[in-house]
Image (spheres, rainbow, N blue to C red):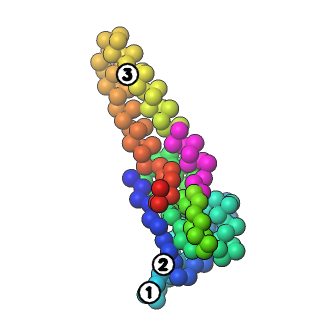
Amino acid sequence: MSHPALIYPVGLELFPSEIAGEPLVDTFDLRVLYQGSLDWQHLMHVRISERAQVDFDRGEVRGFSIASVEASRSASSACGRACFSVVTGVELRSGTRYGCVPQSLTRAYRRQILRSLYALMATLASIALSHAGFAAVGGALMLDYLRDARTIPRKPAWE
C-alpha cells in the first residue's frame, strides 16, 4: 500500500529526469535538505503535475505530499515505467494547500474499480449457473483488482 508523506524541506532543488539521455515527461529528480541535516536526500523519478511544476519553479512551495507508486501495477503503468513516486499535494508559503494527483492515477483507480465490479458480476453469474470453478476464479480476480486499486495514491497526505 502506498504511504503518503508530507515533506517540509529547508532546501529543495528540481532536475528533469532522464533515462539513457532521453528526458521523461513531467518526471523530475528532487534533492531535498531537511532541517538539522547536512546531507541532501535524493528522490529519483518523481512525477509532478504541471500546476505544481509552476509553483516549484517559482520557489513558492513550503511543503509537499509525496506517495510511492511502486507497489501498484496499475499506478506505475499509469505514471510511466520510470516513475517511482508522485507528488499528490502542495502547500505554498502563503499557507494555501491544493491536491495535484495526476489524472492518469485517478483514471487507473476508476478502471480497477470497474474491473472488480465486472469480476463480481461474472462471479455472481457463475454461481447462478452452478459453475463453482469459474466463481472461484472470478472472486480471486475481483479481490486482486480491489487490492491493486487500494494501492493507487488518490489524495494528499493531509486529506
Which mark is first along the chain, 1 or 3?
1
Image coordinates for residue 147, horizontal then vertical, percent: 39, 42
Side of 120 where 114 appears, left or right = right
In percent of the image, x 51 and y 64: which residue is there?
65
Mark 3 secondary-structure assignment: helix
Question: Seen in the image, is 96 located left or right of residue 155?
Answer: right
For mark 1, give the secondary structure: loop
Res. 80 visible in picture: no
> Mark 3 is on which residue type?
Thr
* Label at residue 22: none
Q: Is residue 50 in view from this perspective? A: yes
- The label shown at residue 41 is 2
**Disc 1 marks which residue?**
37
Prevailing SS of the magenta stretch: helix
How many residues crowd mark 2 within 10 Å: few (<14), some (14–19), many (20+)?
Answer: few
For the residues bearing labels 1 and 2, Cβ distance under 8 angstroms: yes
Q: How far apart, in angstroms, are the residues tagged by discs 2 and 3?
A: 47 Å
Q: Quadrant of residue 128?
A: top left
Image depth: mark 1 or mark 2 in front? 1
Q: Earlier in the sequence, mark 2 or mark 3?
A: 2
State yes or no: residue 127 in magenta. Answer: no
Indicate the position of residue 33 as horizontal and vertical percent values: 51, 82
Above/below status of 23 relative to 79:
below
User: Residue 83, position in %: x, y?
Assistant: 55, 59
Q: Which residues are magenta?
A: 100-110
Inter-mark Cα distance, 3 to 1: 54 Å
State whether residue 139 is above or below residue 18. Answer: above
Residue assigned mark 3: 123
Location of residue 153 in the rendering, given as x and y in whole percent from the top left corner: 48, 52
